[in-house]
Image: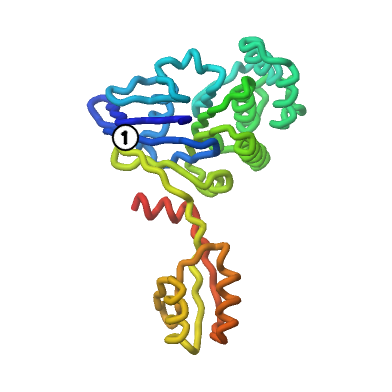
């Protein structure tokens, strides 16, 4: 088990943030963490990382209590939303500092410089960096020890497009390398590009859900009864809306479904497809 939280309870100033909450991550990959502001996303990451102590419950990482994090330190990294850099040091100096602390080779540092596209500003002081450049340095520093489990708190907030693309590609590469990343983010569209599974905080509990890759397909037809019967026989739920038939269909089945409708000589016109997003799913959960 990579991460296991059982019966977690935590309150702050007599306000319950979590109450008997549980979650598990069993397999490597990139996972999202979403919730409205103030619901406890950052608090959860701080609890897992040992910066806060739960009142009840247990948090285990790779089978060990998170109260024994010193022995797990090289395997785990956490990039907080409010973490700061030394303004008069360069990116190179920041990376070298972490590498020296953990006795990591300069070859590993050079690999990260390339992966995070740091070369153009590598030796300049941090005070001259953009927000996106600073975030790339922070995540690169967290990767120096080649950790197996990474926590990122709002890593894409306010970043330029180049930095977003670089960080997205890093997350995809980490998934290919069988690493585990838990990303707290409000950027739902971007989150959906790197993960199929997300956890959410609701009513002081933790839940997991798969991202739904579905679309609403609607169309007109001169054969509404025959078409509806065909679709229902194929296990689709059919709605009628202003003279159109509407079904919810997996995005990767749309072309095959249209082909079968044509084979059955079922005529249709004016097809419209609306692909459901993670934002739609989020609204259904929290509305």
Give 283 or 174, whichever is nearer the viewer: 174
Colour convention: rainbow
Looking at the image, which residue is at 40% across and 42% down?
A: 200
Looking at the image, which residue is at 44% across and 56% down?
A: 280
Looking at the image, which residue is at 38% across and 25% down?
A: 59
In the rendered image, the vertical position of residue 191 relative to residue 216, given as above or below: above
In the rendered image, the vertical position of residue 264 relative to residue 64, given as above or below: below
164 relative position to 18: left or right: right
Does the rendering let one see residue 89? no
163 relative position to 28: left or right: right
Give 139 or 237, whichever is nearer the viewer: 237
Name the spot of residue 123 as percent of width and height, x first. 74, 19
Name the spot of residue 44 as percent of width and height, x first. 39, 30
Name the spot of residue 127 as percent of width and height, x first. 64, 21
Give 59 or 246, whichever is nearer the viewer: 59
* Residue identified by numbered label 1: 21
In the rendered image, the vertical position of residue 111 relative to residue 221, given as above or below: above
């Amino acid at each position: 088990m990579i991460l296991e939280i059982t019966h977690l309870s935590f309150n702050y100033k007599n306000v319950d943030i979590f109450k008997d909450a549980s979650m598990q991550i069993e397999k490597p990959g990139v996972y999202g963490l979403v919730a409205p502001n103030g619901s406890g996303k950052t608090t959860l990451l701080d609890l897992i990382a040992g910066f806060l102590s739960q009142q009840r419950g247990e948090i285990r990482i790779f089978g060990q209590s998170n109260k024994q994090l010193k022995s797990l330190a090289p395997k785990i990294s956490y990039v907080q939303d409010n973490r700061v850099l030394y303004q008069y040091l360069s990116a190179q100096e920041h990376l070298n500092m972490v590498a020296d602390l953990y006795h990591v080779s300069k070859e590993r540092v050079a690999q990260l410089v390339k992966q995070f596209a740091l070369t153009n500003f590598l030796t300049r002081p941090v005070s001259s960096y953009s927000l996106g450049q600073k975030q790339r340095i922070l995540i690169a520093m967290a990767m120096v020890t080649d950790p197996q489990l990474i926590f990122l708190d709002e890593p894409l907030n306010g970043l330029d497009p180049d930095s977003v693309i670089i960080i997205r590609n890093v997350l995809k590469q980490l998934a290919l390398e069988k690493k585990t990343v838990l990303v707290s983010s409000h950027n739902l569209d971007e989150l959906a590009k790197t993960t199929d599974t997300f956890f959410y905080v609701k009513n002081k509990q933790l839940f997991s859900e798969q991202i739904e890759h579905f679309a609403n397909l609607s169309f007109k037809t001169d054969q509404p009864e025959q078409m509806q019967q065909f679709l229902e026989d194929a296990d689709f739920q059919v709605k009628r809306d202003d003279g159109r038939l509407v079904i919810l269909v997996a995005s990767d089945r749309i072309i095959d479904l249209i082909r079968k409708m044509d084979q059955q000589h079922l005529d249709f016109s004016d097809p419209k497809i609306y692909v459901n997003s993670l934002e739609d799913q989020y609204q259904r959960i929290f509305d």
